[in-house]
Amino acid sequence: MLLNDGTYKGKQILSPASVKTMLGREWIYDDKAKNGNTYGGTILSYGLGIYQMDGKSTARFCKDTEIDLVGHTGEAFGLLSMLAIRPNTKDGYVYIMNGEAVEEDEDARSAGKFSNNYIWAETLGDAICRNVFVR
């Protein structure tokens, strides 16, 4: 079940089919065909503005546990953010932060240690995985 199948406080806001379509995969990267840009291995599949972060891929946010997430990251004008939902649960998280100390694409210190995500996204995601998702 994703997003309570479109139900909020007992009221149907979106149909279950709409939720499934919104969070589904419309494009999947094929390494043999080289059918698109993965942004350094961070985005390996994409839907309608949502991408899937498979727990065992370079897009993952959990270092030692395979936890799949769907969501979207954002960055613009110093804002860094992410919405991540854990499929088939009621778990997810949002973070919003104001900038970083290094130029993300120009400074090697911004690179993640175990994924192709930025270090700050990886650090926050892994902390949530270890302290919230894995109990």
Image (cartoon, rainbow, N blue to C red):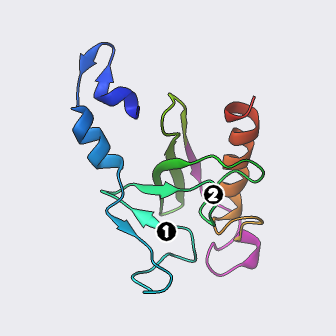
Q: Is residue 102 magenta?
A: yes
Give the residue drawn at x 51%, y 45%: 84
43 horizontally vs 118: left or right? left
Label of residue 60 in the image: 2
Q: Secondary structure at mark 2?
A: loop
Q: Percent from the top left, x then y, of residue 117? A: 63, 65
Give the residue drawn at x 62%, y 63%: 57
In terms of image quadrants, where is residue 113?
bottom right
Outermost residue on the bottom side: it is 33
Label of residue 91 in the image: none
Q: Residues within 10 Å of mark 2 (few under 14, many from 20)?
A: many
Query: Mark 1 or mark 2, which has the lower sequence index?
Result: 1
Three-letter amino acid code at the position of disc 1? Leu
Q: Percent from the top left, x then y, of residue 60? A: 63, 57
In the image, 10 versus 122, the foreground residue is: 10
What residue range appears in magenta?
95-110
109 horizontally vs 20: left or right? right
Q: Percent from the top left, x then y, of residue 58? A: 63, 67
Give the residue drawn at x 51%, y 30%: 89
* Spatial CA span between label 1 and label 2: 10 Å
Mark 1, residue position? 44
Give the residue drawn at x 48%, y 86%: 32
Q: Percent from the top left, x then y, of residue 26? A: 31, 62
In terms of image quadrants, where is residue 116?
bottom right
Outermost residue on the front side: it is 32
23 horizontally vs 69: left or right? left
In the rendered image, the quadrant that contains the N terminus is top left
In the rendered image, the quadrant that contains the C terminus is top right
34 horizontally vs 101: left or right? left
